[in-house]
Image (spheres, helix red, strand yellow):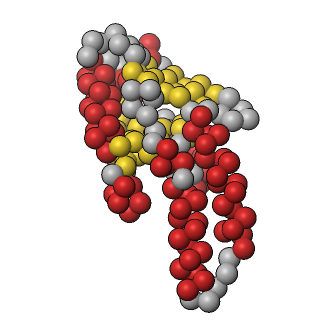
Amino acid sequence: MENNMVITERDYPITKLWMFKAPIIIVLMNIVALFFGYYFPYLVLALPVMLIANPLIRNRFHYSLEEKFLIVRQGVISKKQRNLPYGVIQNVFLKQDLFDRIFGLATLRIENASQAGGARDIRMRQAQEGVGASGNKINIPGLKKQSAEELKNLILKKIKENPIEDSQSGL
């Protein structure tokens, strides 16, 4: 691939299966709970919400690997765009929970050095492991494992090609 080629979610798409991950887990939790004689109506209420919310969130999430920046655009109600210079990226890794391993999926997580938001943001990041940018993390979930590995390698290559410059670091 050429260095100036823009890579987007069209090249490495989030699978449709990811959109149904939470509803599938909700249904399985209800089945297990019913087997033990419990019933959790709030899980049943969460099901339609997740069936509507996840496709909306996915359709409003876009990322691109451009020449100097990883760009993330997201938001259903409140739109935001994040331009992350490759030079400030500290960590790029794959995350897989049991569901992901079973279905051959992975989440690509990109972390930078910022502590954006302090303690409130740390609590928010622990609670939210979904799609998009939050605090100093960007999650791209529901990728096929091979696609996630390829995307990770492309980002690592961009990091080497674009070391941080003094103008980007604020020094």
* Count of picture labels: 0
Above or below — where is 2 with respect to 147? above
Horizontal and vertical percent position of residue 53: 66, 47
Above or below — where is 141 with respect to 169? below
- Residue at 53%, 71% (x, y): give it: 28
- Residue nearer the viewer, 119 or 157: 157
Image quarter (top left, top right, bottom left or bottom right) of the N terminus: top left
Q: Is any atom of residue 101 visible in this view? A: yes
- Residue at 68%, 48% (x, y): give it: 52
Above or below — where is 106 with respect to 151? below
Above or below — where is 75 with respect to 37? above
Horizontal and vertical percent position of residue 102: 35, 60
- Residue at 54%, 37% (x, y): give it: 133
- Residue at 35%, 13% (x, y): give it: 5
Outermost residue, bottom direction? 37
- Residue nearer the viewer, 157 or 46: 46
Q: For this view, does 50 lie left or right of residue 140?
A: right
Q: Is any atom of residue 85 visible in this view? A: no
Image quarter (top left, top right, bottom left or bottom right) of the C terminus: top left
Horizontal and vertical percent position of residue 56: 65, 40
